[in-house]
Image: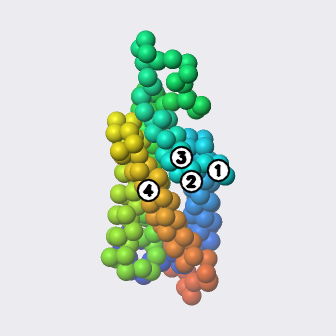
Amino acid sequence: MREFASPSTRASALPRPVKALYTGFCALTVAGLLSCIALYDGVVRFGARTTPAELYDHLVSYYQPSPEGPLATAAAAPAVPRMSSRKLLEVTHFHLFSMPIYLLVLGHLFLLTGLRASTKTGWISAAGAATVIHLSAPWCVHFGGGALAWIYPISGAALLVTFAVLMGVPLYEMWRSAPAARPYASRAGF
């Protein structure tokens, strides 16, 4: 951990194998985020002629509890199956374990940049807040319906932007030029 606290530690000074590892992790993270966009498309059903109001209605109907009881009819069934409370809990359970790990790794990588400490704190805090809000967004739609559905796309966009910064700045610093000295080479055996 002292490497992250040292003012002399920078992403550009990392050994090439470490840079390759972090780059691979970021590439797979980008692929994961793109798959989230594809999954979101399955929920809101983007289309050339789909209006924002229709996208919003699709989101709300997907996360709202299914109508039950004798009044529920086949005609009321949505084009895309609704998410049950149980399924939403399972998805949330998985994401509560995986998203903090992504945030932890990307945050540590971001700490290796040459940015000011206050800038690092701000971006990492924003990414943490976006993660927490986006994890709770489906539940907001589930319980609050259309009144809270705006949280989902806004928090998703915030998550994409903050994670892009946490990945982009270190990747840029790592690969923009060769470091003048390699302080880790002798200690790490690279």
Looking at the image, is mark 1 or mark 2 nearer the viewer? 1
Residue 136 picture quarter: top left
Figure check: 181 above or below 187: below
Which secondary structure lies at badge 3?
helix
Mark 3 or mark 4: name the one nearer the start of the chain: 3
Tell me the CA gap for discs 4 and 2. Answer: 15 Å
Looking at the image, is mark 4 or mark 1 nearer the viewer? 1
Pointers 3 and 1 in contact (CB under 8 A)?
Answer: no
Mark 3 or mark 2: name the one nearer the start of the chain: 2
Amino acid residing under circle 1: Arg
Q: What residue is shown with label 1?
A: 49
Looking at the image, is mark 3 or mark 1 nearer the viewer? 1
Amino acid residing under circle 4: Ile
Front residue (pair 110, 89): 89
Looking at the image, is mark 3 or mark 2 nearer the viewer? 3
Tell me the CA gap for discs 4 and 1. Answer: 22 Å
CA neighbours of label 2 inside 10 A, class few (<14), some (14 to 19), many (20+): some
Left or right: 125 in relation to 42: left
Looking at the image, is mark 3 or mark 4 nearer the viewer? 3
Tell me the CA gap for discs 3 and 2. Answer: 20 Å
Q: Residue furthest top?
A: 70
Q: What residue is shown with label 2?
A: 33
Amino acid residing under circle 2: Leu
Rendered image coloring scheme: rainbow
Q: Which mark is residue 55?
A: 3
Tell me the CA gap for discs 1 and 2. Answer: 25 Å
Which secondary structure lies at badge 4?
helix
Could you say where residue 130 lies in the image, as x and y percent from the top left? 39, 57
